[in-house]
Amino acid sequence: MSAGRIGCMTTPAQGSRIPEGALYACDNSKFGSDGKGRYWPGAEAWFAWLYRTVERYGPDRCLWALAPDQPFDAAGTLTESLPWLARIRELGIPAAYAAQDGCDAPGLLPWDSFDVLFLAGSTEWKLGPVAERLAPRGKGVHMGRVNSRTRLGIAEWFGCDSADGTYLAYGPDKNLPKLLNWLAELNGHPSLIGGTQPFAVPDATSTAPPPQADLRRRTLPGHEAAMRSKKHPPTATSDAAPAFPTPRGPRAKTR
């Protein structure tokens, strides 16, 4: 992490110490490691934790913070997230918004209020055509629950800047070399750090994956993992996962 190969995603429940110099992102524990949100501390406690985290580690190393959401509920996520997006931005960090099944219905994605589109929702939706279509819209894009080479390739194909997963939590000594090999295979070279900033603004009108030459970025995992690149769309599999971020160029300071 300190070398910049992968980053650290932290949550209110983890109490993780961010390694020196590592990039980090802040999840909210609404889904959580149990998939049921058992570790969600409540909105005010979550924001107090976020404030302390940014104050301790600095806003410049923070890729984004995910606003409170309602997993698998697009309308509920809009109601839950809207009051917090501006407050996240006021901390000097990008605000991420969780895209859920059905969020493409009119009025359910407040594009001007967030900076990073976090592909959440069910596995089928997240790996499907709607999520792929939403990705190239001029925002940073992150995919959650990415724990396999195949899933990482799908995230790359969609144009995601980052992904997160629990892959490294299970046998890190064995799985870290595998993860780094996946990244090297996908990107064509081992480093995900192509620039000094995490998110650039992609072409909002483009529906094609970014060209291979543009695949320069860094990665984060705080559940753990990372991401990026493939010339042909991979086939989805049913593995569950979370992983982390990478940049395209100068940071768009409006997550």
Image (cartoon, rainbow, N blue to C red):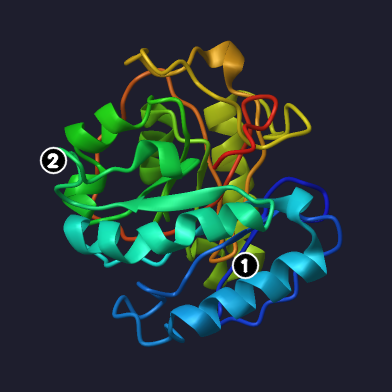
| Crowd tier of the residue under label 2, counting other residues whose Cα lies within 10 Å: few below 14, some 14–19, many 20 or above | few
Question: Is residue 207 shown to the viewer in this render?
Answer: yes
| Crowd tier of the residue under label 1, counting other residues whose Cα lies within 10 Å: few below 14, some 14–19, many 20 or above | some
- To which residue does mark 1 refer? 172
- To which residue does mark 2 refer? 105
Pinpoint residue 176: horizontal percent, then vertical percent: 63, 57
Pinpoint residue 121: horizontal percent, then vertical percent: 25, 56
What label does residue 216 carry, if any? Answer: none
* Side (left or right) of 158 relative to 245: left
The residue depicted at 60 percent of the width and 27 percent of the height is 200
Pick the residue in front: 197 or 180.
Answer: 197
User: Relative to residue 134, is residue 89 depicted above or below?
Assistant: below
The residue depicted at 62 percent of the width and 78 percent of the height is 49
**Separation of residues labelled 2 and 1 (CA atoms):** 40 Å
Q: Amino acid at mark 2?
A: Ala
Pinpoint residue 111: horizontal percent, then vertical percent: 37, 37
The residue depicted at 80 percent of the width and 70 percent of the height is 56
Q: Nearer the viewer, mark 2 or mark 1?
A: 2
User: Relative to residue 50, is residue 116 depicted above or below?
Assistant: above
Pick the residue in front: 206 or 245.
Answer: 206
Question: Is residue 73 shown to the viewer in this render?
Answer: no
* Side (left or right) of 160 relative to 251: left
- Among numbered discs 2 and 1, the one appearing first in the sequence: 2
Pick the residue in front: 36 or 240.
Answer: 36
